[in-house]
Image (tube, grey):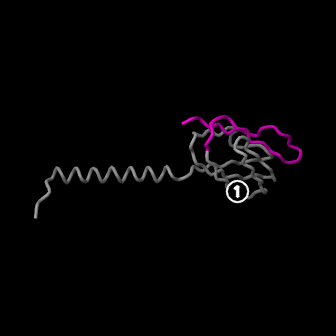
Amino acid sequence: MRKVSGLKCSIGFLVAACAMFLMADIARAAEPRRIEIHLAHGKPVNGDVIRLKQGDTVVLEWISDEALSLHLHGYDIEVTLVPNEKQSTPFEAFASGRFPLTNHGAGHGHKALMYFEVLPD
């Protein structure tokens, strides 16, 4: 039986440790980013711009104090919110640009509530 030298053993351990860290980073990157969007009286509470990078995978977590019918232009994502119930919407930022989120419900017009800015990767 041949003995493995200390140097070879150390190199092997280092390679295995690096592979473990790399695999952990890949697993974290595969998880979607969760973004909570709170709306009160039809307006965003926690800011009016969400910035993403092209290629990001996110889950939009909505909560509103009133019923809303929202539309994210450019992505044709529509979501109908029920008051005080959290709703999740998966979203992949495949196109770069600045996209308005509007309320298509009665009495709210077509004015942007907030914007999603998707920066090129």
Give yes or no for residue 7 being in the magenta stretch.
no
Q: Quadrant of the N terminus?
A: bottom left
**Residue in view at x 81 percent, y 46 percent:** 41
Residue at the image position 34 percent from the left and 52 percent from the top: 19
Residue 110 falls within the magenta-colored stretch: yes
Residue under the image location 31 percent in, 52 percent down: 17
The image quadrant where one finds the C terminus is: top right
Q: Is residue 104 left or right of residue 54?
A: right
Q: Is residue 5 above or below residue 115?
A: below
Question: Crowdedness of circle 1 by 10 Å Cα count: few (<14), some, many (20+)?
Answer: some
Pick out the residue farthest to the right.
107
* Residue 97 pos. (x, y %): 65, 34
Give the magenta part as a residue range.
93-121
Left or right of 3 on screen, residue 60: right
Q: Is residue 60 above or below residue 99?
A: below
Residue type at the position of mark 1? Gln
Please give the name of the residue rendered at 59% of the width and 35% of the height, measured from the top-left corner. 119
Q: List the residue tagged with mark 1.
A: 87
84 versus 70 height, above or below: below
Image quadrant where residue 109 sits: top right
Q: Position of residue 46 (x, y in %)?
A: 68, 43
**SS assignment at label 1:** strand
Give coordinates of residue 59: x percent, y percent. Answer: 62, 52
Place residue 112 in its image quadrant: top right
Residue at the limit of the structure toward the bottom, as seen here: 1
